Image (spheres, helix red, strand yellow):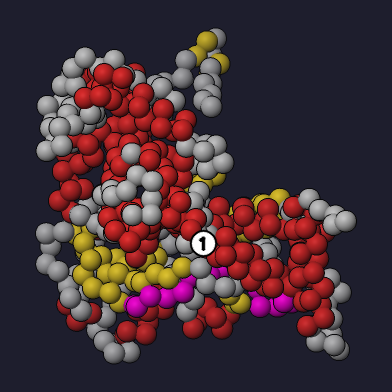
């Protein structure tokens, strides 16, 4: 009779096997008294350095967030230990602590350059990024290095400085400044503010920033795609490195790495300057008329998601009408409107209330095992294409050996509902599934931009003076 072990026990055994294998592979004449992985397991804590930033680590509304943070948290869970994050403000700080072995590894969207590879050991690559020369839209576009006639500022100790040092051999007149006080995001904002003319950034960060600042324009690519990986101290033995190989191999095979990358970057691969500009203008000029209804009828939803969805549906036009007959702010069909008690689809408040109720109902119909944010993306897709067609796409996904509970897998199959060889095998037949994919992607972009704009608005609100009584300050705390 087979004995089934709990998943946590199986994971512990796998980690112990990795340790044992690493020790066996170590040099016979000099086996380290305690392996790098053994130290982590004995300590019960994985110490990971990172940088503050949009793609690495930041504190969000619900706690720590960021692509690198989630990867690191997953590795700590895989090892069965706690994660201790050490966020730094500069690469030089983080590299110093890695060299001093104050950290087990550095997870900071690091590109693998020849210079860095000489100094550190890198784990398996999990992304590729290219380096882009950025300038402000409307200024003269530089198309090659020889066109750089203005001020160029880059992050100190970054891979961009390595690239510039290499280019200077070919272009002796090339000059730039390095900043220890500003990160890549701040440098791009400084370009928009015309504090200087150019900066260099990685393609993934630029894709996110252009949703906030559509004036960021690309001059040219300085460096073709480079591998992104975690860095480790070269003096460590192979055991922690072996565990990293196994962890990332598991992430690849399970589809979780692709899902995580889609969560942070999947919706910003394509950029439309005009659309982004129009949306930001609409947030200032049109949204205030309807904001109270989005907030009042959001229910369990984030009102900003509901507003982003409405913009995708109607561009916040209460009288919007499509060729298929759907109407209003939330583009409700007549039968759906009747079911939701909406007596006039052209009444903005009624439409927003009905759309919110319908989306929340779709969320309840998504299988409980599907986790956020995929759960939300599935519900949005169903709002567009129908729950039946969404389920057909999930069936196709499973037939093809992918995960029907991951949006990153299902969104590849939704367009197949246009193809006869696929839709003739489904329950509900033909559907414009590709439009549902675009629909969800657009809403995600609008939502991200709206969240950022709201954060900026709140920062600009006047701060209230703390109340005092009998000469003592009354401190106010927030959750």
Residue 334 visible here: yes
Quarter holding the N terminus is bottom right
Q: Magenta stretch containing residue 233, yes or no? A: yes
Above or below — where is 425 with respect to 467? below
Q: Which residue is drawn at 62% across and 64% down?
A: 250
Q: Along the horizontal axis of the image, is 320 left or right of 152?
A: left
Q: Residue at x 52, y 43 (%)?
A: 370
Looking at the rendering, the stretch of residues picked out in magenta corresponds to: 223-238
**Camera-nearest residue between 179 and 366:** 366
Q: Along the horizontal axis of the image, is 326 left or right of 48?
A: left
Q: Magenta stretch containing residue 29, yes or no? A: no
Residue 53 location (% of width, % of height):
45, 53
Above or below — where is 473 with respect to 430? above
Q: Residue at x 27, y 55 (%)?
A: 418
Q: Name the residue under label 1.
A: 401
- The quarter holding residue 174 reads bottom left
- The quarter holding residue 303 reads top left
Q: Along the horizontal axis of the image, is 165 left or right of 19?
A: left
Q: How crowded is mark 1: few (under 14 residues within 10 Å), some or many (20 or more)?
A: few
Residue 94 visible here: no
Secondary structure, mark 1, is: loop
Residue 169 location (% of width, % of height):
33, 89
Q: Residue at x 85, y 57 (%)?
A: 2
């Amino acid at each position: 009779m087979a004995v089934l072990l709990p998943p946590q026990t199986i994971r512990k055994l796998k980690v112990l096997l990795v340790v044992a294998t690493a020790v066996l592979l170590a040099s016979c004449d000099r086996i380290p008294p305690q392996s790098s992985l053994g130290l982590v397991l004995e300590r019960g804590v994985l110490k990971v350095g990172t940088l503050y930033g949009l793609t690495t680590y930041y504190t969000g509304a619900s706690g720590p967030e960021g692509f690198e943070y989630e990867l690191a948290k997953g590795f700590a869970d895989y090892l069965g230990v706690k994660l201790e994050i050490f966020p730094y403000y500069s690469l030089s700080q983080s590299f110093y602590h890695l060299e001093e072995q104050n950290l087990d590894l550095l997870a900071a969207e690091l590109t693998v350059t020849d210079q860095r590879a000489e100094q550190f050991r890198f784990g398996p690559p999990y992304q590729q990024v290219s380096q882009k020369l950025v300038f402000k839209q409307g200024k003269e576009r530089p198309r090659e290095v020889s066109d750089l006639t203005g001020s160029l500022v880059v992050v100190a100790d970054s891979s961009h400085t390595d690239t510039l040092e290499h280019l200077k051999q070919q272009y002796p007149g090339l000059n730039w400044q390095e900043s220890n006080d500003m990160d890549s995001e701040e440098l791009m904002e400084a370009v928009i503010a015309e504090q200087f003319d150019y900066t260099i950034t990685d393609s993934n960060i630029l894709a996110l920033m252009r949703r906030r600042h559509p004036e960021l324009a690309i001059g040219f690519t300085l460096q073709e795609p480079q591998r992104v990986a975690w860095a480790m101290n070269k003096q460590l033995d192979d055991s922690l490195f072996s565990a990293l190989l196994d962890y990332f191999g598991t992430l690849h095979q399970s589809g979780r790495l692709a899902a995580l990358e889609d969560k942070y970057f999947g919706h910003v691969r394509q950029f439309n300057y005009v659309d982004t500009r129009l949306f930001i203008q609409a947030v200032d000029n049109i949204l205030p008329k309807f904001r109270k209804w989005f907030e009042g009828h959001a229910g369990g939803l984030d009102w900003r998601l509901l507003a982003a969805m409405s913009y995708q549906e109607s561009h916040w036009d209460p009288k919007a009408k499509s060729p298929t007959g759907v109407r209003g702010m939330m583009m409700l069909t007549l039968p759906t409107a009747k079911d939701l008690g909406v007596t006039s689809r052209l009444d903005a408040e009624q439409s927003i209330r009905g759309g919110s109720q319908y989306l929340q109902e779709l969320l309840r119909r998504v299988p409980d095992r599907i986790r956020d944010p995929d759960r939300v993306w599935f519900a949005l897709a169903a709002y567009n294409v129908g729950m039946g067609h969404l389920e057909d796409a999930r069936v196709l996904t499973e037939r093809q050996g992918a995960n029907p509970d991951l949006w990153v897998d299902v969104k590849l199959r939704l367009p197949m509902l246009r193809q006869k060889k696929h839709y003739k095998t489904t329950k509900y037949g033909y559907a414009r599934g590709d439009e549902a994919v675009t629909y969800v992607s657009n809403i995600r972009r609008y939502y991200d931009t709206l969240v950022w704009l709201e954060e900026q608005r709140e920062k600009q609100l006047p701060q209230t003076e703390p109340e005092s009584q009998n000469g003592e300050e009354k401190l106010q705390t927030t959750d």
